[in-house]
Amino acid sequence: MSADRKGNPWALVPFVVFLLLFIGSGVVTGDFYTFPVIVAIAIAAAVALAMNRKESFDQKVEIFCKGAGNTNIMLMVVIFLLAGAFSEVAKGMGAVDSTVNLALSVVPQNLLMVGIFVIACFISLSMGTSMGTIVALAPIGVGISGQTDISLTLSMAAVIGGAMFGDNLSFISDTTIAAVRTQGTKMRDKFKVNFFIVLPAAIITCIILGIITMGEQATITQQSYSWIKVLPYICVLITALAGVNVFLVLSIGVVFAGVIGLVDGSYQLMSIIQKIGEGMAGMYEIAFLAILIAGMVEVIKHNGGIDYLLYRVTRNIKSKKGAEFSIAGLVGLTDLSTANNTISIIITGPLAKNIADKYGIDSRKSASLLDVFSCCIQGLLPYGAQLLVAAGVAQISPVSILQYSYYPVLIGVCGVISILIGFPHFGEKGKAERNATN
């Protein structure tokens, strides 16, 4: 595809159809999750196949299947399934409860909100899911607020902030998987770049939470935990950071968690297999979404839609920094429209890759930008799943949480600063690695 062509704006009609269905149904019903997103994508894909009468329907189906079966997409799907299997097996043998209880046992009583935020960071980093983290910790946050003068809105904001930390960084997070696969980089490399971009945001958030809740204390009932049950999460983090292939990392994690469950009596052999199946089934929707979106994007690309988007987005770009801001803006606007950071990355990933290649942006940085800014927006959406779930548990308005949403705002600020100062600087070695990857 040539980025110099102006392309065909009409080829973007399927995108418009998808947004109208998804956003329109949300506006009409007041619930952005009433209309199944996979149905909206399927309809939009059907519209894409119905366009461009110069091609036969058989040819368009072949183009669709070529995009849907792209190597990166298939790898992404398999990683999604393995991540789901590991998460469910670990959860089923008590890893989540043990991790939460272990963390709560070491939280200083006078730094409760800082502790809740840090615990949420660690759990989401381990579990790879912001939603699972919020479900696990939101009731604890409600309990702390009930025993202190700390507001429910602040407590829920701390939980959501920590949950978005792991959503952005975890090796088994669907956002990380999508960002890495669409940009053609490695998880470990993306993690290193991404971590140092958002670390200041996490530190500043801890300082703010410590200052505004100074003097507040509550007695947290100590619950039992087992160090052994926490080990699968630690194993996955260490092996992933060591550069072990992600398939092996997740497979080792599944086996490790399963063996611990067998030894302590949490599982029998067939129950482990059932949990693996349940975990994979829980990832079916996002896996099929990735396949349908990739097929639709390939048809749109063939019809000139991606050329047009690339032309419009890059025509006023004068520098590498401008290109990085365009990637951040694209994924942010898409997340505002879809209220799903993973889907926004899958949709904008191919375009971001084209922009990164054209302006010499390292794939590690482009992957980080996609993840940082999608998580920034997702953590601030009152109609996003994260705020809705936390608000539902606390029985408060999701909008009220925004006044204390320090971390999502700060990772956006840190992302902008990283673009302005050109951080990180990869040097000649980084350029060589990028060229070898591409």
Image (tube, rainbow, N blue to C red):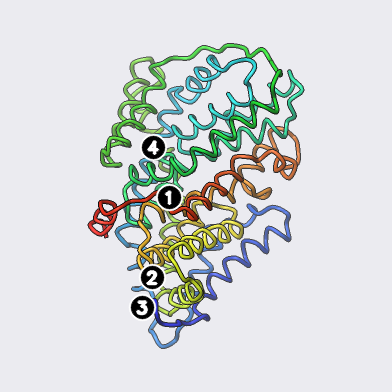
Q: Earlier in the sequence, mark 2 or mark 4?
A: 2
Looking at the rendered structure, the secondary structure element under dot 3 is loop
Is residue 287 in sight in this rendering?
yes
Q: Earlier in the sequence, mark 1 or mark 4?
A: 4
Q: Based on the displayed image, in which of its 4 quarters is residue 111 positioned?
A: top right
Q: Amino acid at mark 1?
A: Phe
Quadrant including the C terminus: bottom left
Label 2, label 4: how many angstroms apart (C-alpha)? 29 Å
Q: Which residue is mark 3?
A: 2
Q: Earlier in the sequence, mark 4 or mark 3?
A: 3
Q: Based on the displayed image, in which of its 4 quarters is residue 141 positioned?
A: top right
Q: Amino acid at mark 4?
A: Ala
Quadrant including the N terminus: bottom left
Q: Position of residue 220 (x, y in %)?
A: 63, 14
Q: Position of residue 258 (x, y in %)?
A: 34, 26
- Vertical arrangement, residue 179 with respect to residue 54, above or below: above
Q: Nearer the viewer, mark 1 or mark 3?
A: 1
Q: Earlier in the sequence, mark 2 or mark 3?
A: 3
Q: Are marks 1 and 3 in contact (CB under 8 Å)?
A: no
Label 1, label 2: how many angstroms apart (C-alpha)? 38 Å
Instruction: Tell me which residue sits at (43%, 50%) in the image.
Output: 423
Q: Which residue is mark 2?
A: 64
- Vertical arrangement, residue 308 with respect to residue 191, above or below: below
Q: Which disc, if any, is residue 260?
A: none
Q: Nearer the viewer, mark 4 or mark 3?
A: 3
Q: Which disc, if any, is residue 423?
A: 1
